[in-house]
Amino acid sequence: MRLTDMEIGETYVATRSFHDDNGTLVLVGDHFTLEKIAPSGGTFAMAFEEETLYLDEERQSEIVEHVDRFLRLA
């Protein structure tokens, strides 16, 4: 599942730890409720109620292309 396939308003739980492009550490078990995804110049800003994560389309390509390996519906 690609990042852009995520559903607004749904809550996701991390199944693998990872860092976003700003160095924010996401830990297994962290919960996030998606508010919006905003692409901008090769970077995706994922605005969650809890925090905003930034994913670079190249540096975090595995997460962008296969987000279901890292986050699943809670």
Image (cartoon, helix red, strand yellow):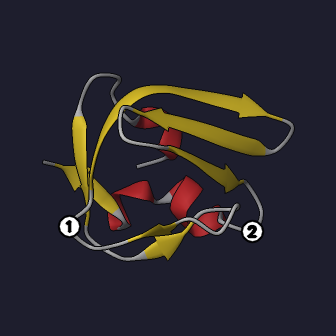
Q: Position of residue 14 (x, y in %)?
A: 29, 63
Helix, strand or loop status at disc 1: loop
Crowding at mark 2 (Cα within 10 Å: few <14, some 14-19, many 20+): few
**Nearer to us: label 1 or label 2:** 1
* Residue closer to the observer: 69 or 12: 12
Q: Residue furthest left?
A: 74
Q: Position of residue 40 (x, y in %)?
A: 79, 32
Q: Earlier in the sequence, mark 1 or mark 2?
A: 1
Helix, strand or loop status at disc 2: loop
Q: Position of residue 31 (x, y in %)?
A: 24, 51
Q: Quadrant of residue 69?
A: bottom left
Residue for point 64% across, 27% down: 38
Q: Left or right: where does residue 14 sit relative to residue 23?
A: left
Q: Quadrant of residue 51?
A: top left
Marks 1 and 2, how far apart in space?
23 Å
Q: Left or right: where does residue 26 sit relative to residue 37?
A: left
Q: Position of residue 43 (x, y in %)?
A: 75, 45
* Number of marks in picture: 2
- Identify residue type, mark 1: Gly
Residue for point 26% across, 61% down: 30
* Residue closer to the observer: 49 or 45: 49
Crowding at mark 1 (Cα within 10 Å: few <14, some 14-19, many 20+): some
- Identify residue type, mark 2: Arg
Relative to residue 37, is residue 52 depicted above or below? Answer: below
Q: Which mark is residue 29?
A: 1
Give the residue at mark 2: 59
Q: Which mark is residue 68?
A: none
Q: Left or right: where does residue 14 sit relative to residue 38?
A: left
Q: Left or right: where does residue 5 sit relative to residue 58?
A: left
